[in-house]
Amino acid sequence: MTYTDKDQQYKRYTITSALPYANGPVHIGHLAGVYVPADIYARYLRAQGEEVLFIGGSDEHGVPITIKARKEGCTPQDIVDRYHAIIRDSFKELGISFDIYSRTSSPEHHKTAAEYFTKLYNEGKFIEKTSLQYYDEEAQQFLADRYITGTCPHCGNEHAYGDQCEACGTSLNATDLINPKSALSGAKPVLKETKHWFLPLDQDEPWLRQWILEEHKGDWKTNVYGQCKSWIDAGLQPRAVTRDLDWGVKVPLTDADGKVLYVWFDAPIGYISFTKQLKGEDWEKWWKNDDTKLVHFIGKDNIVIHCIMFPSILHADGSYNLPANVPANKFLNLEGDKISTSRNWAVWLHAHLKDFPGKQDVLRYTLCSNAPETKDNDFTWKDFQLKNNSELVAILGNFVNRTMVLTHKFFGGKVPAQGTLGDLDRETIAEIATFPERIGRNIETYRFREALAEMMNLARLGNKYLTETEPWKLYKEDPARTATVLNVALQICANLAVLCAPFLPFTADKMHRIMNLQALGWKDAGRADLLMEGHQLAQAELLFEQIDDAAIEAQVNKLLETKRQNELNAWQPRSVKEKVSFDDFGKVDIRVGTVLECSKVPKADKLLQFKIDDGMGGRTIVSGIAKYYPEPEKLVGRQVCFIVNFEPRKLKGVVSEGMILSAEDKDGRLVLVSPSDMVTAGVNVG
């Protein structure tokens, strides 16, 4: 069994990426944290000639899916079918190069997960525990945490869930809630005994401590190691592998009706069940051979599952490799705010691909260059534009295009002879040779931002070389020297086509096409003879195009509208003011009047001046609602409610003889309070 990858040579690599939850599309946070780095790693290893299996799939079980299905009036299968297709297709369009992308609702997965549970059960690896859980007597079923709502004991939010209060962010147990009720029937749930099976993580603590805290100290990323150490030092507790639910992998025991495998247990087994679905493959070599390296790419919210719980499941079987590394990233924020699917505060991949067709590599580049590898990072639309215009267009695209255009102009699109090299040429060629190792070392140690920066440094080297040699000025006086310069520049282009491929696969394909370059491996890179003299190039094409301000403004406005909608959705009525007596209320004299005239008060943007027929000879009232009624003349003839017995006040030189009543809507608008039917001016309200 493999316990560490330090100083070990591997023949093959099993790469897994966290299974996206199939109750919604994938967003840029998922991509930056998991899928783009995993794809870079897999593509790099394949370019090295390594045997690679890159596994992905949809996680299709769990309570959020059943809740979404209930809200939409459909089945859980309808939900997962819809989002599995969206996720799978958008991954493919972005160039995430899975060798297999499957789903946990597949028959093969149900069979594999059930068999795994049965094997551990028969070997006595679980413990049985009976506990009290909430039960809905009207719906006749046990309630998962998300099916229980109530008042948060910490902040008083009346809509907290049984696992968390989203108002204050506190983690809860369902029994913590005040006045709990079932989300299914609205009834008050009762506590009822139920039996479940638990993985005794406390018994695994000694070997986990040795394996993680000793063998992987200094090997795993600091945030991964630190979170694992915190859990282990706090003392591990048995964790349920089953739950009362009707959606998921059925527990394969005769006394387990109405129970399924907990999603944290069955989902990682999906990596194994998906591998089994590969045609003509010896699936066990990817999971059980000592010369196979297992690497999990995940976000920081999945660290404990992939570093403690899933390894404990594998260890309990005894025949599987344990992960050599779990390079978890932190979180990506959006425009300074935490990405939230419930608030729709996200950039959804499938929508982005429609809004920016043909620009997959721009998104890959932006997310990699700003990846949250060591700390939470922020995605902004301005930065997305800047990365495209000032880096991809101005550095990489500019260098390749200049080189290709000049070669076509001076040498008919054929690679000129390298000729006699000068000092600058030799220095440049020597530096080219260092880039494959510099980029590769960073990829192998999961520093993808640094690897991408090194790739762009090669493009910067090319631009610097052209600037210093100025081949566009040389040709008339020294065609041979011009040939040498463009030959060296073309060699840099060819190297870029190879070395950018893990990061920018679509761009790499385009560069291969315009240079008529045969498929090359990573070990070919670093040389200055990838394009031979006389080799015919295809026509030059722009690798990237500018993204204009209008396209970015549209995306920013979309987010601003989302923020506005979130604020409206979060609106709640203000707290009721302190009680007053009926006699006090009776002192306020509220009347109905008809608007005779209405105009803006000069030099006062917020004020309107009303002339009111109050049934008593008329009065003037000034009100601060001009912002919401830009055409005040249209209010003439409308009836309004106003307080008649306030002391007169002078506002901007106008004496106001009362207060017109208005209601503040949840979006902040002030709306005049009016009777629904016309009444006699001057009548009382009350």
Image (spheres, rainbow, N blue to C red):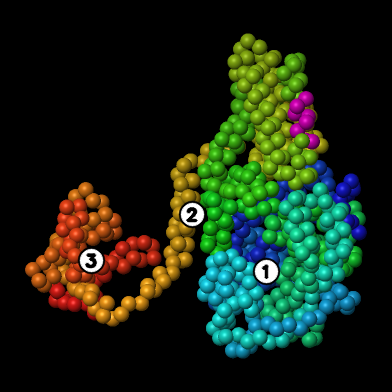
Question: Is residue 554 rendered magenta in the image?
Answer: no
Query: Which region shows up in magenta?
Result: 430-437
Estimate the spatial distance between the alpha carbons at disc 3 and disc 2, rounded to whole Å: 36 Å
Q: Which of marks 1 and 2 is nearer the N terminus?
A: 1
In which quadrant is the N terminus drawn? Answer: bottom right
Tell me where residue 654 appears, x and y as whole percent: 16, 55
| Residue at the disc numbered 3 | 660
- SS for callout 2: helix
Estimate the spatial distance between the alpha carbons at disc 1 and disc 2, rounded to whole Å: 29 Å
Mark 2, Cα crowd under 10 Å, few <14 / some 14-19 / many 20+, is some
User: What type is the residue that disc 1 sits on?
Assistant: Glu
Which residue is rendered at x = 66% and y = 59% of the image? Answer: 88
Which residue is rendered at x = 73% and y = 84% of the image? Answer: 194
**Left or right, residue 359 beside residue 561:** right
- SS for callout 3: strand
In which quadrant is the C terminus drawn? Answer: bottom left
Is residue 608 at least partly visible in the picture?
yes
- Residue placed furthest toward the top: 477
| Residue at the disc numbered 2 | 559
Tell me where residue 499 appears, x and y as whole percent: 73, 37
Q: Predominant secondary structure in magenta?
A: helix
Tell me where residue 448 appears, x and y as whole percent: 71, 44
Question: Which disc, if any, is residue 60?
Answer: 1
Q: Quadrant of residue 575?
A: bottom left
Q: Nearer the viewer, mark 3 or mark 2?
A: 3
**Left or right, residue 241 beside residue 602:** right
User: What type is the residue that disc 2 sits on?
Assistant: Leu
- SS for callout 1: loop
